[in-house]
Amino acid sequence: MPTLEAGLARLKELEHHAILYELPAANTASLFQITLLAAKVPRLPIIVSGPTSEITFAAEAIHAGAQDYVEKEPFDARTLPRTVRCAIERHREHILLIEEKDNYYGVFDHLVEGIFRTTPDGHYLLANIALAEIYGYASPVELMASIKDIAGRLYVEPGRREEFVR
């Protein structure tokens, strides 16, 4: 396909198992295109074919949303089926992890008990909706942003937090 938009339109026409995306150049704009592609079609694994063997750029492409990176030159068509199968399997595992995480947070956020995780020094790492409501906040994010010193703000007796942490 001549453009990313044309490729996205083509993806809607037929069923696909993976995307082989040839980068025009190894630059920031290409990394943005990978991220955009991964966001537009999150259920398809992306294999990037690029012009460089630079390991840093390949790692950045993976971080941007690709499941694999292969060099354009020398391109070995014999290894492509294995590359595609491995990318599909890695992506399938990734999707399962996301679904498991969403399921966990769905349960976590809908409990009636206030549940949280903190650092030993008293900063929230995680809080559910019930805890935010118990303390009178509109959301867990607001709660975590507002309370920076759990021991000083939430415990009536000095030293109780330290006792709890022990």
Image: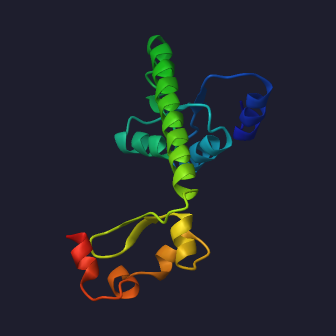
Residue 110 drawn above or below residue 36: below
Number of marks: 0
Residue 118 is situated, as x and y percent measured from the top left of the image, at 35, 68
Q: In which quarter of the image is residue 44?
A: top right
Name the residue: 46% across, 10% down: 78
Residue 6 drawn above or below residue 18: below
**Image quarter hosting the N terminus:** top right
Residue 113 is situated, as x and y percent measured from the top left of the image, at 50, 63
Q: Can residue 141 be seen in this view?
A: no
Q: In the image, 74: left or right of 99? A: left
Q: In the image, 124: left or right of 50? A: left
Nearer to us in this view, 116 or 87: 116
Q: In which quarter of the image is residue 17?
A: top right
Nearer to us in this view, 88 or 107: 107
Name the residue: 60% across, 41% down: 38
Q: Can residue 59 be seen in this view?
A: yes
Q: In the image, 84: left or right of 163? A: right
Residue 156 drawn above or below residue 50: below
How did the renderer colour the structure?
rainbow
Q: In the image, 45: left or right of 69? A: right
Residue 47 is situated, as x and y percent measured from the top left of the image, at 53, 30
Name the residue: 58% across, 56% down: 110
* Residue that lies at the very extreme toward the top in this rendered image: 78
**Image quarter hosting the C terminus:** bottom left
Nearer to us in this view, 128 or 71: 128
* Residue that lies at the very extreme toward the left in this rendered image: 166
Nearer to us in this view, 75 or 85: 85
